[in-house]
Amino acid sequence: MIATDNSGAPEPARSWILRLWQRLPVAVRSILSALLVFEVLQLGWAGAFLANTKILPAIPWNVPVGLLYLGLVFSYFNGRGWPRSTATARRVAMRARGLSKEQWLWSLLYSLLTLVFMASILSVVYRFISVPDLAMMDTSMLPWWTLYPSLMMLAINAGVSEEAGFRGYLQGGLERRYGPVAAIAASSVLFWMAHLNHAGAVARLPYLLAAGVATGALAWAAQSVWPSIVAHALIDAVVVTKKAAGLGPDWLMEKPAPFAETGIDGPFVAFSVLLVLSVPAGVWLLRRLRRAAPAR
């Protein structure tokens, strides 16, 4: 028997896959969706970069290819394309809402403060924690005019894929069901777990959790993933440039001198003060950002 709507017109039967999906708890659906979005967005450019190291390494062609791939896939997860029946759900899940100039001002100030906050964690907390070196890919075959644009593309790719997955699809869904505190906590833990394949993932727990909370709070305050994408890409651009190219001050590294060797020296005191002050300053900026948001 064919189901009909109130007007008597036939209504297509909903697929068993869709019915099964809708029966899953919100948390499970949010996690599965986030992991799918994260992996699909991230792996496209990664494949292009690996190919670029073998094919025409003197030309950074992975950058335009990566930007095109990110743009097309991000647009799809943000509601473009087929099927139109899921367009609204995809757009709501991504929550890539545009911001006013005032919102962007507070968001960018918060992003710069987040960079100071993360640098302070590296310079203070990691004097007491031993972190193994990350295995860096050999990029000696790449000239500088290919390497540096690729490093920037790495930061952009990480910012878009991880924020779309963890602060968009995951955190947004959990916020609507469980509230912002639980959502930010859950997305931060899942964000850390996504990095368990990295060397010293357990030792990097404080850094990754702090990054997750900072960007998660930004996405919540703005009700958009765009500011957290910018903040994430900014932090990664500074860090990967230092690690891969040696550019930037030494305190951007995860291996400062152990506290047992340095004791309470000048840099330790300075970054400890910055670490403490950046928290209330960040809360103040988030409140300003929330007040600048239009009525929802």
Image (cartoon, rainbow, N blue to C red):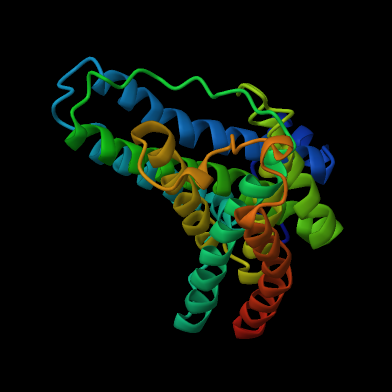
The location of residue 73, given as percent across then percent down, is: 42, 42
At 73% across and 34% down in the image, what residue appears? 129
Q: Quadrant of the C terminus?
A: bottom right
At 48% across and 43% down in the image, what residue appears? 250
The location of residue 60, given as percent across then percent down, is: 20, 33
Q: Is residue 30 visible?
A: no
The location of residue 115, given as percent across then percent down, is: 54, 57
The quadrant where residue 148 appears = top left
Nearer the observer, 266 or 53:
266
Nearer the observer, 224 or 173:
224
The location of residue 37, given as percent across then percent down, is: 56, 38
The quadrant where residue 209 appears = top right
In the displayed structure, 296 sits above or below 266; it is below
Task: Judge from the rendering whether residue 127 lies leftward or rightward of residue 28; answer left or right.
Answer: left
In the displayed structure, 61 sits above or below 251; it is above
In the displayed structure, 196 sits above or below 27; it is above
At 65% across and 28% down in the image, what residue appears? 131
At 64% across and 51% down in the image, what residue appears? 167
